[in-house]
Image (tube, rainbow, N blue to C red):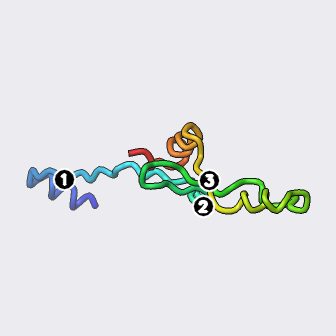
Amino acid sequence: MALVCLMFYRLNLEIPIIRNNMPKLKTKSAVKKRFKLTASGKVIASQAGKKHFMRRRTKAQIRNLRGTTILCPQDGYNIKKYFLPYGIN
C-alpha cells in the first residue's frame, strides 16, 4: 500500500477521491404494506374496524367496511411526509 502511494506521489498524479453519496432513505415497511398512493397524490387505505367484534354489527355496516377509503388531506400529508421519503414530488 505504501509503495502504491509513493508511486503516485513521485508521478505527481492526483488520486481520484470517490465520494460516497449518503444512503437512500428507507420507506417504513409497515406503511408500505398499509397505504398506497394514487396518481393524483391521494393516500388510499383499507377500512378500519373489520378485524373482530363482527357479530354486533349489522350486515350493512359490515358491507360498508369492505374495500378502501381515501384518507383526509392532512392524514395523507403526514403519511407522505414522515413515512414515505420520496412520496412527495
For label 1, the residue is 15
Q: Observer-nearest residue: 50 or 23?
A: 50
Residue type marked 1? Ile
Mark 1 and mark 2: span between their CA atoms? 45 Å
| Apparent side of residue 3 relative to residue 88 in the rendered image (left or right) | left
Q: Observer-nearest residue: 70 or 23?
A: 70
Residue density around tag 1, few if under 14, some if 14–19, many if 20 or more, within 10 Å: few
Q: Nearer the viewer, mark 3 or mark 2?
A: 3
Residue type marked 2? Lys
Q: Nearer the viewer, mark 3 or mark 1?
A: 3
Decide: is 72 above or below 10.
above
Q: Secondary structure at mark 1?
A: loop
Q: Quadrant of residue 30?
A: bottom right
At which x and y percent is residue 12? 9, 50
For label 2, the residue is 33
For label 3, the residue is 69
